[in-house]
Image (cartoon, rainbow, N blue to C red):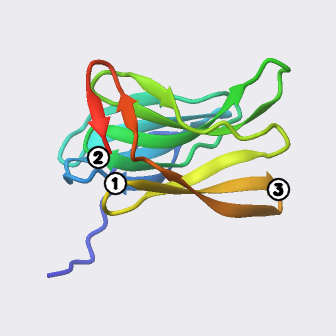
Amino acid sequence: MLTNEIKQFVADSAHNVHPLWSPDGKFISFVKLNNGNSDIFIKSVGGKNQNKIIECAIESYPTMCWLDNKTIIYSDKSGNDDGKRNYKLFLKNIETGEVQNITSPSQQYLGDMNPIVSHDKKIIFFKRMINDNFGNIYSLNLKKEYLLKEKTYFL
């Protein structure tokens, strides 16, 4: 039965956006925008505490999705040798803290963002932005091993 009761899930002075359920339904991940910084947090559905799990680059606006109950795929700006920054996709195991870069777009692009995962967990689709006004959809086959701190995921 639906109710009209609306409750605030995160109450602080930051701008909290893009909530996502974890696959097991235990957590909500979200992006917290605060003083020019954007970071990714999780909060248990029935809990009070929120935990920062990903500290993003300054002036980054991350997008994310869950791969499984312990792994988040997210976009973040990262520096290159020439000082230019564009968005790349990363995997983060929220239990171990291990991070792995999974895309490396050319510097001619703004980068990769908005990841989604196929239901069988074998393919990531994402947007590769060419410039501020144009991008295309790309896919990444995950049928290879990703070693995340003593755990090997065969996807």
Q: Where is residue 53 in the image (x, y as percent from the top left)?
A: 40, 29
Q: Residue at x 62, y 58 (%)?
A: 138
Q: Name the residue under label 1.
A: 121
Q: Residue at x 79, y 17 (%)?
A: 81
Q: Do the residues labelled 1 and 2 touch (CB within 8 Å)?
A: yes
Q: Residue at x 41, y 37 (%)?
A: 41
Q: Residue 68 carries which label?
A: 2
Task: Kindly tell me whether residue 10 is visible in this rendering.
Answer: no
Q: Which residue is drawn at 27% across and 19% down?
A: 150
Of discs 2 and 3, which sits in the foreground? 2
Q: Is mark 1 on a helix, strand or loop?
A: loop
Which amino acid does the dot numbered 3 rest on?
Asp
Which of the two discs, 2 and 3, labels the residue nearer the N terminus?
2
Which of the two discs, 1 and 2, labels the residue nearer the N terminus?
2
Q: Where is residue 36 in the image (x, y as percent from the top left)?
A: 68, 34
Estimate how packed mark 3 is, as few (under 14), some (14 to 19) or many (20 or more) residues with alpha carbons within 10 Å: few
Question: Front-most of 123 and 8?
Answer: 123
Task: Kindly tell me whether residue 95 is visible in this rendering.
Answer: yes
Q: Is mark 2 on a helix, strand or loop?
A: strand
Q: Residue 132 carries which label?
A: 3
Of discs 1 and 2, which sits in the foreground? 1
